[in-house]
Amino acid sequence: MAFDTLDFLLERCRGKTPPRVAVAAAQDADVLCALDEARREGIVEPLLLGDRRRIGGMIQELGLDLGRCEIVDEPDDGEASRRAVAIVASGEAQLVMKGQVKTATLLKAVLDKERGLRAGSVLSHLFFLEIPRLHRVVAVTDGGLNTYPALQDKVQIVENAVSCLRRLGVERPRVAALAAVERIDPAMPCTLDAAALTLMNRRGQIGNCLLDGPLTLDQAVGAEAGCFREIDTPIAGNADILLLPHIEAGNLVGKVALSLIGCRGAGAVLGARAPVVLTSRTDSAETKLLSIALGVLLA
C-alpha cells in the first residue's frame, strides 16, 4: 500500500468542511476524547445522542471542549442508535459512529428497512493496521461483522474493501485470500473459496484488484524469501488487503496487532449508504480518532 503510517487519514481531512457525525450512545470517555480532538482539528462536527446527564458529566470531568455540541437526550441505547442512523439517512449528518452501545444494537438500526442505511450489498468491516515491522499500512477484512461468510459474501467483502482503497488512492489493490496453508485442500473449505476467488479475479468477475490465494499470512506480507519456495504468487509479500477466512481469524489478527504488537489501527463498516465508524470498547482514543478520520474520508 502507498501509506507508511495512518497519519495520512488525518492529513487528508484537514482543510475541508467538517461533516457531521451522529454518535449513538455517546457516553463513552474514549469516544468523547477522540471526538474532542477531531473537532479541534476541524475534521468533524459531533452530534451526541445518548444519556445527556452522563455525557455532560464526562465532558466536564475530562475537560473537553464539547460543551457547545448538540446533545440529544436519549438514554435508551436502541432508540439512540435508531435516531442516529435516521439522522444520517435523512442527510442531516454524513456518518454514524458507535458509542457505548452493543455492535448488534447499532447494526440492527443500520439494517432497518425503513429508516436504516441499507444499500443492497453485504456489510463488512475493514480495519487498517499500521505495522511498524513492515513500515506500512495493511487492511484486514472481515474481523467484525460476517462470522462464516459464504463464497458470494466473500466476493462482496472483497469488493467493499477494494472500493474503499480505490477511494483512498490505491488504484489496483493487491488482495491475499488467507488460509493456514497455501495449497488447495478439500478438507479446508476456505482454501477452496480462496481458489475460486482467484479464478474469478483472473476472469474479470472481481475487478479493479489483483487477488491471489490461498496464501498464508507470511506469504501475504512477509519479506523473507523462504516464504515463497513452494509457491509462485504475484502478491509476493506485498498484499494491501488481507481477506480472512472467518471472524475468529480476523478478530484475532486485529487484537494481536493492537494489543500485543502495539500497532495503530482505524476501522469502519463498508457497504452501507454512509460510513459507519465501528470500534471496539477496548480500542484506544487514538484508534477511535483515526477511525473517525477514515469515516470522514469515505463520507
Image (cartoon, rainbow, N blue to C red):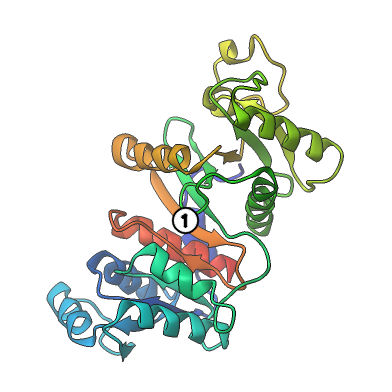
- Decide if residue 223 is on the left or right side of residue 132: right
Q: Determine which quarter of the picture holds residue 38.
A: bottom left
> Looking at the image, is 56 positioned above or below residue 244?
below
Question: Which amino acid, mark 1?
Answer: Gly
Q: Quadrant of the N terminus?
A: top right
- Rendered residue at 66%/48% (across/down): 158
- Decide if residue 35 is on the left or right side of residue 88: left
Q: Determine which quarter of the picture holds residue 297.
A: bottom right
> Looking at the image, is 65 positioned above or below residue 174?
below
- Rendered residue at 55%/84% (across/down): 115
Residue extending furthest left? 61
Residue 265 in picture, x, y percent from top left: 42, 49
> Looking at the image, is 47 positioned above or below residue 170?
below
Residue 143 in picture, x, y percent from top left: 47, 47
Is any part of residue 238 visible from this angle? no
Give the class, few, some or many, for how many residues have Cα within 10 Å of label 1's Cα (few <14, many ≥20). Answer: many
How many labels, in total? 1
Nearer to the camera, 99 or 2: 99
Q: Quadrant of the C terminus?
A: bottom right
Pointer 1 residue:
267
Residue 185 in picture, x, y percent from top left: 64, 20
> Looking at the image, is 270 positioned above or below residue 189?
below
**Badge 1 element:** strand
Nearer to the camera, 223 or 81: 81
- Rendered residue at 44%/66% (across/down): 292
Is any part of residue 147 visible from this angle? yes
Residue 295 in picture, x, y percent from top left: 51, 66
Residue extending furthest front? 187
- Rendered residue at 63%/45% (across/down): 150
